[in-house]
Amino acid sequence: MASLVVLVFVHLLTCEVLSVSRPRCDRCDQTSCNCSWKQLQQVPTTTSKLTTVLNLSFNWITSILHDDFLGYSSLRSLIISNNRINMIDREAFSPLKNLENLDLSENDLDTLSAEWFRHLPSLQSLNILGNRYQSLSQDSLFQPLKNLKKLHFGGPLLQSVRKGDFSGLGCLEELVFDGRNLQKYDKGSLRVIEAISHATLGLNDPFQKNLQLVEDILSDAVQPNTTLTFTDTELFKNYQMSPVELAFNRGIRTFSFNNCNLSVEVCFKLLDLMSDSEISTFMIEDTKVMLLSETQLVIPNNQKHLEVVSFKNVEVTPFHVFPALIFLQPSLNKLRRISVLDSKVFAIPCGTADFISLEYLDLSQNMLFDLTFKEMMCDGDGGVFLNLKTINISKNHLETIDSELFTGLRKLENIDMSGNSFNDMPDTCQWPPALRYLNLSSAHLTQVTSCLPESLQILDLSNNSLTVFNLKMPSLTDLYISGNKIGSFPHGGLFPHLTFMSIQNNGLQTFSHDSLDEYKMLDILEAGANTYVCSCDFVAFMNNDLTNRVKIRDEFKSYICESPDAVRGEVVTEVRLSVFECHTALAFSLLCFSILVVVLVIVGLCYKFNVVWYMTMTWAWIRAKRRPVITKGELKYDAFVSYSEMDAGWVEAHLIPELEESEPPLSLCLHKRDFAPGGWILDNIMEAIEQSHKTVFILSQHFIKSEWCKYELDYTHFRMLDHNDDTVVLVLLEPIDKNTIPKRFCKLRKVMNSRTYLEWPDDDNHIPRFWQSLRAAIAKPMTVGDMSFDTTSVNSVSLY
Ligand SMILES: *[C@@H]1O[C@H](CO)[C@@H](O)[C@H](O)[C@H]1NC(C)=O
Ligand SMILES: *[C@@H]1O[C@H](CO)[C@@H](O)[C@H](O)[C@H]1NC(C)=O
Ligand SMILES: *[C@@H]1O[C@H](CO)[C@@H](O)[C@H](O)[C@H]1NC(C)=O
Ligand SMILES: *[C@@H]1O[C@H](CO)[C@@H](O)[C@H](O)[C@H]1NC(C)=O
Ligand SMILES: *[C@@H]1O[C@H](CO)[C@@H](O)[C@H](O)[C@H]1NC(C)=O
Ligand SMILES: *[C@@H]1O[C@H](CO)[C@@H](O)[C@H](O)[C@H]1NC(C)=O
Ligand SMILES: *[C@@H]1O[C@H](CO)[C@@H](O)[C@H](O)[C@H]1NC(C)=O
């Protein structure tokens, strides 16, 4: 009893630990999770119930438990290939009612169980390739999979296929059967499948050892409509072609080799068999063709039905001993389409074959160069490819655009010359009249010329170094000029029929209504990845008007601002610009206006509070402070007389004679007489005042109006503020209303109010007394230091 409890406890604990340690798949977008290459040892939990695709390939998962997929009810596609799965719980897939695609390939499953599939009614595609099972192990394994369309099964360890293995399967679109080491095949096993559209068979070992087995499989799997592919097989001997012959005899029309090794001998045998068959399409891909020995080659008969030949990445070794193919000529005159891609073709002699029916020729990714291409085109003798509609010579080593090689091809409509290094194009060219598609992308072109024909409807010039595109193209509907260095939209009037333009990844800085309006028919535009300057107009245009005008087919998030710096790297439609950036002119006007207002206010305030006056005074006063100290005894004058020019008559007639010429004579300083000529008037005044014991102001209406007198008054006033001295003598020539004295001479007004001043009497009898008083005022003895400037006490001047 106790041990049972412990067991249960341990079980609970491990369950707990397991569910706690279950990893999460965090590399998900809305519906699909890619958790491959994560070293997961367990199926991770999901973050979203809506996950429809879960890719767990290339992990370390060993077993799949019954609750692993509980959260994945929406899953449509589950990829657990390339793990180490050796155990799957019979109920593991039961939550996956909607699963359509299950990939269990490259794991370690050694037995398969129909139980797994019981709950997968929607499954359409099942891949169990590359596991460790030796047989499908159970009758009716696929019975529950009523909707299966694609089945990939087999692997290196698969030994036997038995009757009943495939029962229940209806029509398959695709069967991939890896029976590379298959030993035993029960005749009729595959026949239960009603029809197989594409059968891909890897039967290398049976092909070497047991041709009967291959034949049995082919006779079951192949119907006339089946596309048959042999893969991962080496075929070197003619006799190995007997199963192929059987398939041909069953009437198949499409046949291919993929990733095989073939001998030249086998190829010729194949061509021979093909000439008597219904084969119309023959393809070889990723295959080596080898010349093994000097065998007598069977010259094949003419191909009756062969129309499409496609070789891709076919290596011929050693190519220099390879027999010339000139004898193939008669057998190729029914061909409509030839593709020889990526197969190191560097020359096809003129007249190798009479390609009279050829409509499509694709020689891309080869090694043709100017000389050999010219040879192949028989120097432009149009008789060879009379019916050619499309030629693809992209990614070769051509360096010259030689339109005359095509001129004679009256039916030629499409030329793809992309991926060659042309560098430039001739000024004029002679293209076939029907040409409507020309691909010159990745061709190192730096400019275009009128070599380009006006008949073109589709023109691809992407990934070159063009800076402008300005040719008239009246028929053009599709223009590709992405990946160049174009700085502005081409002039739309040049392409009246353009409906599509791709101009991504250029140097465009902006575009607008105006640039688009010229394009009368433009419907779809791709213009991302340019160096956009995100002005307000452009941002507004992108946000509001653009989509009314054209459809943007590339993603809006590829429209990125390159400048201004503040928004560099931001998506144009998400940029928010400030008012200042958007209405620069208005903002600047406002700014200038407010600066003007502030300046005016300051000027007004200065005027109102006489700031200029105070500043002039402060300046004069500071200069005065810097002058050497003058002691009382050194003073030159008894009085400086400040008067208005209008009052000069009175001064000269009365004052001077009275004071200077009578006893004792007083020395007066008069600006007219004693000022040093040329000096700054303010300096002169200051000096005069400082060199005099007293300053006599001859006050009159004129005085108050006089500029110079104002200075004198100003300075004296200033000094009074500073020294508080009483060296001022006021003489009133005529009555003055005190209120007419400017306000800033507050102290003067105070002085006038507080002090008696001398008035020039109207009555002549009082004149002697006036002079007496004046003399007394000027000659009044002073206390020591009264007149000397005290340089140590530079007071800050209180303005009021
Ligand atoms: C899934 O992720 C792997 C690893 O990061 C990556 O290499 C692979 O390209 C991705 N596959 C797909 C289909 O996105
Ligand atoms: C799953 O992931 C592998 C590895 O990243 C990748 O090669 C494969 O294409 C993916 N399969 C699907 C269906 O996305
Ligand atoms: C083969 O395909 C054609 C049409 O592609 C169809 O009419 C014909 O019935 C098919 N034959 C078989 C045996 O499936
Ligand atoms: C083809 O030959 C090469 C060696 O030339 C070999 O590595 C390769 O495995 C062979 N392919 C097949 C399918 O046997
Ligand atoms: C020409 O071949 C290239 C490379 O194989 C291919 O990308 C292109 O689509 C082909 N052009 C035409 C017009 O078929
Ligand atoms: C032009 O050729 C390139 C490279 O072969 C190809 O990718 C592109 O799709 C072609 N352009 C058009 C418009 O077909
Ligand atoms: C652009 O052209 C260069 C060669 O001119 C080539 O290497 C490159 O792959 C091309 N890029 C694209 C996106 O076609």
Image: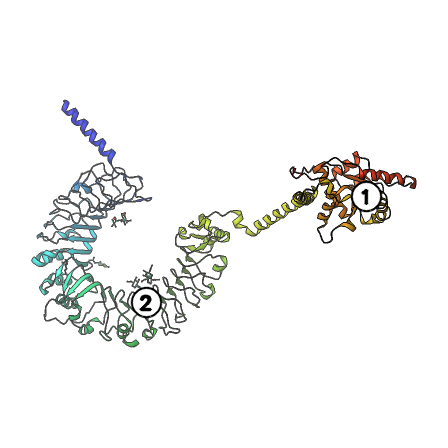
What amino acid is found at the position of numbered circle 2 in the picture?
Answer: Ser
Position of the C terminus, as image quadrant, is top right
Residue 342, percent across and down? 24, 63
* Residue situated in front as seen by the camera: 338 or 504: 504
Residue at the (52%, 50%) spot, across then down: 582
* Quadrant where ligand 5 appears: bottom left
Asked if one can make out residue 190 in the rendered structure from this viewpoint, the answer is: yes
Quadrant, the N terminus: top left
Residue farthest to the left?
209
User: Which of 770/331 is in front?
Assistant: 770
Decide: few, some or many residues near mark 1? Use Cα within 10 Å; few <14, some 14-19, many ≥20: some
Q: Nearer the viewer, mark 1 or mark 2?
A: 1
Quarter where residue 375 is shown: bottom left
Give me the disc on residue 412: none
Q: Which mark is residue 421?
A: 2
The kind of secondary structure element at disc 1 is: loop
Identify residue for label 1. Answer: 666
Looking at the image, residue 638 lies above or below residue 502: above
Q: In which image quadrant can residue 303 be found?
A: bottom left
Where residue 438 sits, quadrant-wise, is bottom left
Q: Is residue 545 left or right of residue 297?
A: right
Q: Is residue 278 visible?
A: no
Q: Position of residue 487 (x, y in %)?
A: 44, 61
Scheme of image coloration: rainbow
Q: Position of residue 182 (x, y in %)?
A: 10, 52
Q: Is residue 563 above or below residue 295?
A: above
Residue 324, percent from left and from top: 17, 73
Give, as a three-letter code, the residue at label 1: Leu
Looking at mark 2, is its residue's CB closer than 8 Å to ligand 7? yes
> What is the C-alpha distance between the residues marked 1 and 2?
110 Å
